[in-house]
């Protein structure tokens, strides 16, 4: 049975996503917001948003960032203004699958109200774990670029031991860094110790930050506070990998002359092809199985 997919906006990661989706049999792909893209996609149809027929779509793929709170989406490869109103969503069939990278109150409440299935890809463990690899590689790239010392033997503190923090700590340790990891739970602190790393309770970060060359935050709440920043050596760097606005007191870091970088969307910067394939694989799982794979 044929199916229709609409890809609305998207960044460099979506170029590989589209290429992967083109391999699906009996599939028509409508591209909206790609009119400034130099390369074409044979077999896909570039259309204006107003020419889409929502009632005929089986799948809608929103940008990684989803929409803002007014329903507007970012279009990296277009100047088109696209607004996904309640009236537009209401034209979709109940069976239509809607994919986004991240969601917000607008998207979540609207799709719940209209009984539409919204899949927030970045909330899934498989996507987050796969994406943690290019995130870690991007952090290593920045560390090499912004320092005049080797990662080997440098003192690294990773704040948070979730899906990203675990991978980042592992990769820096593999390069010979002296890695400590801050975490809240006793279970995580035990696992950190088992990995041969130094475990630091999150509440005691400020007691260890005086011996730190690179501080890498992965927690999306302000946990790298004035107390910890004021203890950092003057040459130290902070890389904040958490979603905007990050988890660092950037104003105080600036006052202290500590360089603090909010490094968002690293997978899309350092490995857009790999990141696009990760997203495409999950989308194809849904389409092939007709239901979410846990």
Image (spheres, rainbow, N blue to C red):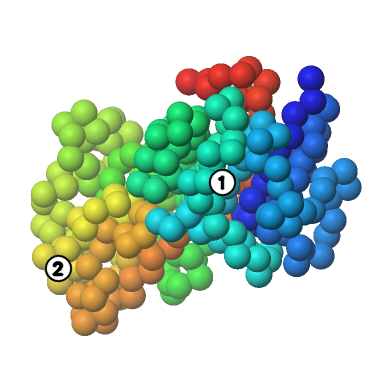
**Foreground pick, 224 / 31:** 31
Given this view, does label 2 or label 1 mark the residue nearer the observer?
1
Tag of residue 88: 1
Q: Residue at x 48, y 46 (%)?
A: 86
The image quarter in which residue 208 lies? bottom left
Mark 1, other Cα within 10 Å: few <14 / some 14–19 / many ≥20: few
Q: Secondary structure at mark 1?
A: helix
Q: Secondary structure at mark 2?
A: helix
Tag of residue 45: none
Residue furthest to the right: 42
Image coordinates of residue 258 in percent, x first then y, are 28, 76
Image coordinates of residue 243 in percent, x first then y, are 37, 55
Q: In the visual, does 48 lie left or right of 114?
A: right
Mark 2, other Cα within 10 Å: few <14 / some 14–19 / many ≥20: some
Q: Is residue 76 above or below residue 283?
A: below
Q: In the visual, does 130 lie left or right of 186?
A: right
Can the viewer see residue 146 in this picture?
A: yes
Image coordinates of residue 80 in percent, x first then y, are 65, 66
The image quarter in which residue 169 lies? top left
Image coordinates of residue 220 in percent, x first then y, are 30, 52
Q: Residue at x 16, y 54 (%)?
A: 205
**Foreground pick, 77 / 185:** 77
Q: In the visual, does 84 lie left or right of 157?
A: right
User: Circles 2 and 1: CB distance less than 8 Å?
Assistant: no
Residue linked to disc 2: 226
Q: In the visual, does 164 lie left or right of 57?
A: left
* Gap in angstroms between the C-alphas marked 2 and 1: 46 Å
Q: Residue at x 66, y 69 (%)?
A: 79
Q: Quadrant of the N terminus?
A: top right
Q: Is residue 240 above or below residue 124?
A: below
Name which of mark 2 and mark 1 comes first in the sequence. Answer: 1
């Amino acid at each position: 049975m044929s199916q229709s997919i609409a890809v609305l906006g998207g960044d460099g990661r979506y170029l590989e996503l589209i290429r992967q989706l083109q391999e699906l049999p009996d599939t028509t792909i409508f591209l909206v917001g790609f009119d400034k893209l130099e390369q074409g996609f044979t077999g896909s149809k570039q259309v204006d948003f107003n020419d889409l027929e929502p009632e005929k779509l089986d799948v809608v793929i929103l940008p990684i960032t989803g929409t803002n709170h007014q329903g507007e989406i970012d279009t990296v490869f277009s100047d088109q203004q696209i607004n996904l109103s309640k009236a537009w969503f209401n034209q979709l069939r109940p069976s239509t699958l809607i994919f986004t990278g991240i969601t917000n109150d607008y998207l979540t409440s609207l799709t719940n109200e209209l009984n539409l299935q919204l899949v927030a890809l970045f909330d899934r463990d498989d996507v987050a774990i796969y994406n943690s690899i290019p995130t870690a590689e991007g952090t290593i790239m920045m560390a090499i670029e912004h320092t005049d010392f080797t990662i080997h033997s440098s003192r690294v503190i990773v704040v948070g031991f979730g899906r990203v923090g675990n991978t980042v700590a592992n990769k820096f340790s593999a390069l010979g860094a002296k890695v400590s990891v801050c975490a809240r739970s006793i279970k995580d602190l035990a696992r950190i110790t088992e990995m041969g790393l130094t475990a630091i309770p999150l509440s005691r970060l400020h007691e260890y930050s005086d011996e730190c060359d690179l501080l890498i935050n992965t927690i999306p709440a302000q946990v790298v506070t004035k107390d910890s920043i004021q203890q950092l050596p003057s040459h130290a760097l902070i890389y904040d990998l958490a979603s905007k606005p990050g988890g660092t007191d950037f104003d105080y870091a600036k006052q202290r002359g500590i360089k603090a970088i909010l490094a968002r969307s690293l997978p899309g910067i350092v490995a857009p092809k790999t990141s696009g394939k990760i997203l495409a694989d999950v989308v194809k799982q849904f389409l092939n199985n007709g239901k979410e794979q846990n």
